[in-house]
Image (tube, rainbow, N blue to C red):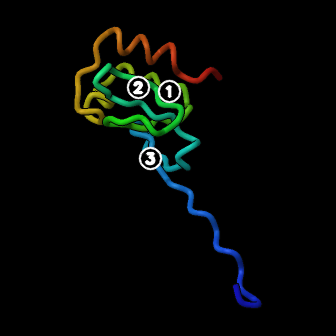
Amino acid sequence: MTTGQQPRARHIPVRTCVVCREKAGKRALMRVVRTEQGIQVDSSGKLNGRGAYLCERENCWERAMTSDILNKALRTILTAEDREYLRQAKPKP
């Protein structure tokens, strides 16, 4: 590094909530993943599978549970068990 140069800013991956379309850092959103074992919430952000991001707003989670938004994003059909699992996994206010 030569004199007078600023250290390079660290890159922060940006993702979009599939419901409200708000952009945020990858760590600020919750990732829902379709894997071979079924639908899972990926807290590590590294599970293999088709993923979709949701922000922590309660109304985004409710819309995701009651509409076809996650079906389209994950390219699957959520079962009643999948929806109940996601209701249990949603962030508490």
User: Based on the displayed image, in which of its 4 quarters is residue 48 positioned?
Assistant: top left
Front tag of 1 and 3: 3
Residue 49 is labelled as: none
**Residue drawn at point x = 55 percent, y = 31 percent:** 57
Tell me the residue that label 3 is attached to: 16
Q: Earlier in the sequence, mark 2 or mark 3?
A: 3
Kindly report the distance in space between the C-alpha atoms of the residues bearing marks 1 and 3.
Answer: 16 Å
Give the image location of residue 30, x and y in percent. Answer: 51, 34
Quadrant assignment for the N terminus: bottom right
> What element does badge 2 sit on?
helix
Determine which quarter of the picture holds residue 83.
Answer: top left
Q: CA distance from mark 2 to mark 3?
A: 15 Å
Q: Residue at x 43, y 45 (%)?
A: 21
Q: Earlier in the sequence, mark 1 or mark 3?
A: 3
Question: Are the residues at dot 1 and dot 3 in contact (C-beta closer than 8 Å)?
Answer: no
Q: State the mark number for residue 59.
A: 1
Amino acid on which disc 2 is placed? Arg
